[in-house]
């Protein structure tokens, strides 16, 4: 069972759709009112954060609750950090799942394409198109423009360092440690996986297995390094999950030898309840 939460939960997740992903918020909604966010799939962390902040303010007004709990996957991690940093009075907790807080080696690899080159223009066009397609497949009503290069600047190591200097709340002060559990009245949590390939029936594992090679041996989930995922209280950083398994994708084809992702979200709902949130 899941204990009832005092405050609403807002979930912001990247590049997922369908019934398998829907099971993740279902794992939490028996404990709280759960809202799924809609922001640009591809844009800077700050731009996405401003979009999210507007929705948080709306939820606070509608629900009558003073604060919300935020859960962000992938680029959703830095996005919720932005909101927690600029409006801590509205946020009870910020939980990141498989988020590249110190940047992603894959983004660094892509960023090596010379700026202003034909290759960069082509790459931006492809990724912007992918973001638009993701919006369509997920049934998103968001009309915000896609900005692939902006997203890339936020997700590579250099861009992440600039962002972190502005919004350091909850970040570890050591290379691979934990961050402050509470800053400005906001609780910080994180978890992630380190198994790029988990199910031979899942075609996305091939892509994540390939992108994992950009990390040169560092433990990662296919797109995010283990240490880069750390924020606040680290629940666990070595689940047998890849970047998509963390949100029960693709089609729920996750490892048979690991806790079901939906159960992980349900356990976190209980954790938030026990922490008075």
Image: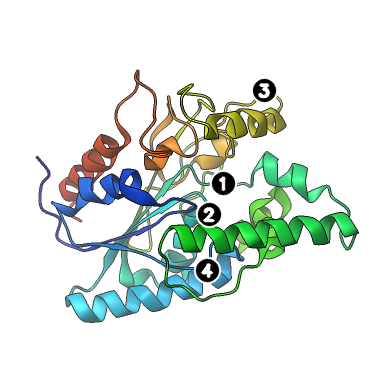
Q: CA distance from mark 4 to mark 1?
A: 15 Å
Which of the two labelled residues, at mark 4 and mark 2, occupies the earlier sequence position?
4
- Of residues 129 and 79, the one nearer the viewer is 129
Q: Is residue 254 above or below residue 162?
A: above
Q: CA distance from mark 3 to mark 2?
A: 22 Å
Residue at the (64%, 61%) spot, across then down:
129
Q: CA distance from mark 4 to mark 2?
A: 9 Å
Residue at the (69%, 47%) spot, across then down:
107
Q: Tell me if mark 1 has few (under 14), some (14-19) or many (20+) residues whose alpha carbon lies within 10 angstroms of its own.
A: many
Question: Dot 4: what SS?
Answer: helix
Q: Which residue is mark 4?
A: 48
Q: Are marks 1 and 2 in contact (CB under 8 Å)?
A: yes
- Of residues 50 and 125, the one nearer the viewer is 125
Q: CA distance from mark 1 to mark 3?
A: 17 Å
Q: CA distance from mark 1 to mark 2?
A: 7 Å
Percent x, y for residue 163?
62, 60
Camera-nearest label, 4 or 1: 4
Camera-nearest label, 1 or 2: 2
Q: Tell me if mark 2 has few (under 14), some (14-19) or many (20+) residues whose alpha carbon lies within 10 angstroms of its own.
A: many
Q: Which residue is mark 3?
A: 217
Percent x, y for residue 222?
58, 34
Q: Is residue 246 visible?
A: yes
Question: Dot 1: what SS?
Answer: loop
Residue 100: give its label.
1
Which of the two labelled residues, at mark 4 and mark 1, occupies the earlier sequence position?
4
Q: Are marks 4 and 1 in contact (CB under 8 Å)?
A: no
Quadrant location of the C terminus in the rendered image = bottom left
Q: Which residue is mark 2?
A: 75
Q: In the visual, does 78 lie left or right of 62?
A: right
């Amino acid at each position: 069972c899941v204990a009832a939460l005092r405050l609403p939960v807002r979930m912001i997740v990247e590049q997922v759709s369908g019934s398998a992903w829907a099971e993740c918020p279902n794992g939490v909604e028996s404990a709280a009112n759960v809202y799924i966010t809609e922001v640009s799939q591809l844009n800077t962390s700050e731009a996405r954060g401003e979009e999210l902040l507007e929705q948080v303010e709306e939820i606070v007004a509608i629900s009558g609750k003073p604060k919300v709990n935020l859960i962000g996957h992938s680029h959703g991690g830095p996005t919720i950090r932005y909101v927690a940093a600029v409006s801590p009075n509205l946020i009870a907790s910020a939980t990141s799942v498989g988020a590249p807080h110190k940047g992603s080696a894959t983004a660094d690899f892509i960023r090596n394409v010379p700026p202003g080159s034909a290759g960069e223009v082509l790459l931006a066009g492809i990724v912007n198109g992918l973001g638009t397609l993701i919006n369509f497949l997920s049934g998103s009503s968001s009309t915000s423009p896609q900005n692939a290069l902006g997203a890339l600047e936020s997700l590579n190591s250099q861009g992440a360092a600039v962002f972190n200097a502005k919004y350091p709340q909850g970040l570890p002060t050591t290379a691979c440690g934990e961050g402050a559990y509470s800053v400005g009245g906001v609780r910080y949590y994180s978890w992630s996986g380190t198994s790029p390939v988990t199910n031979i029936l899942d075609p996305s594992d091939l892509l994540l297995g390939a992108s994992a090679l950009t990390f040169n041996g560092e433990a990662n989930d296919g797109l995010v390094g283990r240490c880069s995922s750390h924020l606040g209280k680290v629940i666990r950083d070595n689940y047998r999950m890849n970047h998509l398994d963390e949100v029960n994708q693709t089609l729920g084809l996750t490892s048979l030898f690991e806790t079901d992702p939906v159960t992980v979200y349900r356990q976190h709902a209980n954790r938030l309840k026990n922490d008075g949130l």
